[in-house]
Image (spheres, grey):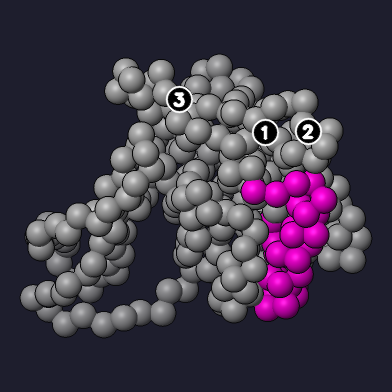
């Protein structure tokens, strides 16, 4: 496992002992087995043993490639099928390739190139929170970076349905730029919480907040969609907004809890993956909207 000192940010690799998991309650006869490895640990698969012949199968489900931050990665979800992308994929019958990178959804060109080179029937990218909480760039750089990221994906997937998702509601960064930091008072109590340390007065000079990111993502997608009919936008607050924050506040002020992951996943399946939605069956390459 990777051990992180939450006070200093230092990381160290802690090797674990080799362990085994036995699935001895499976039904008789041929069956399809899908293993979900832990989403919050580093796992090395040593070997697989079986008391009957095992063969790989061609998964008939459409491949959905999703890229996002630690929220997509699954922070605070309690098991790998409880992350919101997994909940949505299982609800919609999709084969998920989750490129959720904790702290690293940063519009990196190599990430876009990886997506472009990966076979997919559906693609979504969730952009914004890491750009703000790392205070990575200013508004002048943000627009070209988004365009370049989408251009690269389109190099490999010119007609694949592509959904751009803005950040879910995160009150600490709605109007306050980064960088984000650990809340020292919470750490002193033994809790992990985050805070925004930027100056709202610097937004006029180009610093990013989630409000700024949503405004410009919506504009960019709208402009590009005139020539790209397979490009769509979803406001992340439709997945988790103000009423949700009152009912299910972010426990560390940044990441949703397990219950909220399930809610976001169900909503995404309804808003984005159902028939008539941006990534619905009627818009996929083998459907009438392709």
Location of residue 107 with respect to 177 vertically, above or below? below
Which residue is drawn at the image coordinates 53% and 68% (left, top)? 63
Q: Which residue is mark 2?
A: 203
Location of residue 259 with respect to 100 vertically, above or below? above
Residue nearest the viewer, comparing 94 with 116 = 116
Give how far across and how far down residue 3 sits, in percent: 27, 47
Do labels 2 and 1 touch, CB within 8 Å?
yes
Alpha carbon distance from label 1 to label 3: 15 Å
Circle 2 SS class: helix
Q: Which residue is mark 1?
A: 177
Which residue is drawn at the image coordinates 75% and 66% (left, top)? 148
**3 or 2: tag closer to the N-terminus:** 3
- The 10 Å Cα crowd at callout 2, few under 14, some 14 to 19, many 20 or more, is some
Do labels 3 and 2 touch, CB within 8 Å?
no
Q: Is residue 137 left or right of residue 252?
A: right
Q: Which residue is mark 3?
A: 183
- The 10 Å Cα crowd at callout 1, few under 14, some 14 to 19, many 20 or more, is many
Alpha carbon distance from label 2 to label 1: 7 Å
């Amino acid at each position: 496992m990777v051990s992180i000192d939450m006070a200093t940010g230092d990381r160290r690799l802690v090797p674990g002992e080799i362990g085994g998991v036995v699935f001895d309650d499976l039904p008789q006869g041929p069956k399809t087995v899908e293993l979900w490895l832990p989403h919050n640990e580093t796992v090395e698969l040593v070997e697989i043993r079986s008391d009957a012949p095992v063969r790989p199968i061609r998964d008939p489900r459409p491949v959905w490639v999703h890229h996002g931050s630690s929220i997509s990665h699954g922070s605070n979800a309690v098991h790998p099928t409880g992350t919101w992308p997994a909940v949505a994929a299982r609800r919609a019958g999709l084969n998920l390739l989750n490129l959720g990178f904790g702290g690293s959804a940063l519009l990196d060109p190599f990430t876009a190139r990886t997506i472009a080179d990966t076979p997919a029937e559906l693609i979504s990218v969730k952009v914004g929170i890491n750009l703000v909480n790392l205070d990575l760039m200013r508004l002048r750089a943000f627009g070209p970076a988004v365009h370049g990221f989408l251009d690269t994906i389109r190099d490999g997937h010119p007609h694949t349905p592509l959904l751009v998702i803005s950040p879910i509601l995160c009150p600490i960064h709605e109007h306050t730029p980064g960088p984000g930091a650990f809340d020292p008072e919470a750490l002193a109590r033994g809790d992990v919480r985050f805070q925004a340390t930027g100056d709202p007065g610097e937004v006029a000079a180009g610093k990013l907040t989630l409000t700024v990111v949503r405004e410009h993502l919506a504009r960019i997608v709208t402009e590009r969609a005139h020539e790209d009919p397979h490009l769509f936008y979803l406001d992340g607050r439709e997945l988790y907004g103000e009423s949700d924050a009152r009912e299910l506040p972010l426990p560390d002020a940044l990441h949703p809890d397990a219950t909220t992951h399930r809610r976001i996943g169900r909503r995404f399946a309804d808003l984005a993956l159902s028939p008539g939605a941006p990534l619905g069956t009627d818009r996929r390459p083998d459907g009438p909207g392709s």
